[in-house]
Amino acid sequence: MSSAVLTDSRWIARGTDRTSFSRFLGWLAPWFAVLALGVYAAFLCLYHGLNQTNMDNRFAFGLWIFLDLGIIALGAGAFFTGFLVYILKRAELRPILNTAVVVGFICYSGAVAILMIDVGQPLRAWFTFWHPNTHSMLTEVTFCISCYLLVLCLEYIPILLRNRQLRKLPSFLVFEHQLHNLVPVLAGIGTFLSFFHQGSLGGLYGVLRGRPFAFRHGFFIWPSTFFLFILSAIATGPSFLMLVTATVEKVTGKQLVPQDVFRRLGFISGILLGIYVAAKSIDTLIWLNFTSPAEGFAPWTYYIHKPFGTPVLFAEIVLFGLLPAFLLLYRKTAARRGWLLSAAALACIGVLMNRFVLTVQTLALPTLPFDDFLTYTPSWQEVASFGGVIAYGVIVYSLSYRYLPLFAQPNGEQ
Amino acid sequence: MSARYGMVIDLDRCTGCGACMMACASENNVPSLPQASACTGLTPMLVRKVSNGLQGSERHEAFIPILCMHCEQDTPCVHVCPQQAVEVDKATGIVMQMPQRCLGCRYCMTACPYHARYFNWWDPAWPKGMEKSLNPGVAPRMRGVVEKCNLCHARLHAAKEKAAAAGKREIDPADYIPACVEACATGAIQFGNLADPKDPIAQESQSPDAFRLLAKLGTQPKIYYKSKEAWVRALAEPNSGPNVEAKHV
């Protein structure tokens, strides 16, 4: 009787080989501990207020905003893979589609959860829908992220309903079938929404006239960062998917997708990263020579504060931009899994660095002539809350991998 | 006729006594927060000390009161607020903050180049008994919302009510004076209507000694400063003063 309680084989798809239930629980246990600490830290922030963080009146955005922007960029693989498979008919990427949806769902739901802690009055979140300021980039972000999270939920449900036990319920089966038919439409809607909110996240800082380090001119109402964020997100989203899949393959000791999928994702990532690096370089030159001086700020002053010197700019564009783009596109390195994954990791670090520079360095730099360079170290509550989101992601992904057909091949095997 | 309320602050007269800060806190029911630091407290009016960066007999210091600049053009905080909790009152030019609608996202604080916006990191609290001395015309703000200088808007309301009771359409300028202006012992802070050419501050703002902070950003702030000292005027823009290093001390 007790052995029956301690097994979950009935919930695992037929023909798939998964580790024992007790070993799986052992894997989840530390992540649940991190999640519990994160939930406690989040409770402290909600109950006592944001005085639990180390943000202040000058450093009003901190770790959370940086990581939100980072994981939303990395989660772009979800919509972009859907776009490639359903809109551009790249069927060879189908094996990675389900995992892309789950990764996207985790990234976006985690980011929304953190945003709800990050605002001072979370119960007023609906005000943005009721009294929207259509001129605010944050309004666009709020609308698009909320809608896209709903789309991701609708895309995740059919995967969820393909669980062995849930499939036994006829109504679920019909519902799953109906939703599955909708997925191409949802992919189109998701693409539209994602292009906008990825861009708007870039626009959040690009429109800040009062922060000349971040302020950019652009096209119509959108600053150049709007387009750079879209490009960098769709360039690194596939790289992040590669990294996640390769990590799961390493942990489980199984080959989950054909090597061709990795090469195809690497090629797409490399091409887009190359375009992004070119656009980012042009944008930086325009900003250094025209935009910033016109606002009264000599660009060299941004780089006199250590550790944010010019090496950061170099690293962001060359080391974590141009170099991975080259490695992903060069035939000899792209053909070797080690180089391919290293390049993907560099690209992901690059996009995180870009988000860090735009959010944290912008606030650290002085604007008034008699201001000082600011420093900020997140509190344990901030770190733990975000650790909780990471743990939540690992748990959701682990459960999805174990009980759902994440890497189903055309013949149904995993 | 629409007004454009603003200030001209004579930095050569400012002694840094802080009376304006105290008056502001008292008028606007700013809570007493012993747990707050210099970076987490609520100081809608903040007097900062600056120097020319030199030492010995060549050293000069000045005090510069920083408050919301009530930017007129592309007001940075207004267009970023996702739920219209910030607006420019077209009748007065005052940049208004509505704490009742504020989500506490702090995007406006990020947008403000003057760091003149403050977040309520704690629940408002006053020492026992002090709550009896609160200004009944100003609502205390709750935890988790942003606040800033609104040029003592409650006083403008009172002036309007007085004018209405007297059957007048326009307020008497003597009835609307922000608390910091009233409290300044040296008369360093002058307040008035920049749109009225006869108003002394409209003329003062055009003086060769007058300047605005970060004017090149193009946001048209309505708080002017003036000083006869070149190094103080160099505070207006970064990198604008030859051989002058302005430092917050």
Image: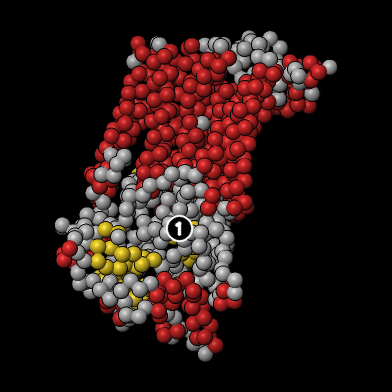
Q: Residue at the spot x=39%, y=25% of the render?
A: A346
Q: Position of residue B168 (x, y in %)?
A: 49, 87
Q: Name the residue under label 1.
A: B37
Asked whether residue A21 appears in the rendered view, the answer is yes
> On the rendered image, what quadrant is the C terminus of chain B found in?
bottom left
Task: Give the camera-side residue of A306 and A79.
Answer: A306
Q: Position of residue B139 (x, y in %)?
A: 57, 70
Q: In this view, does A141 lie above or below B239?
A: above
Q: Is mark 1 on a helix, strand or loop?
A: loop
Q: Residues within 10 Å of mark 1 (few under 14, many from 20)?
A: few
Q: Position of residue A108 (x, y in %)?
A: 56, 36
Q: Residue at the spot x=59%, y=76% of the render?
A: B132
Q: Residue at the spot x=40%, y=39% of the render?
A: A356
Quadrant of residue A322 in the image? top left
Q: Where is residue B72 in the image (x, y as percent from the top left)?
A: 37, 64
Q: Is the image coloured rainbow, by chain, by secondary structure, or in one colour?
A: secondary structure
Q: Residue at the spot x=32%, y=47% of the render?
A: A213
Chain for disc number 1: B
Could you tell whether A393 is left or right of A314 in the image?
A: right
Q: Which residue lies furthest to the bottom in this view?
A: B166
Q: Which amino acid does label 1 sit on?
A: Ser
Could you tell whether B136 is left or right of B191 in the image?
A: right
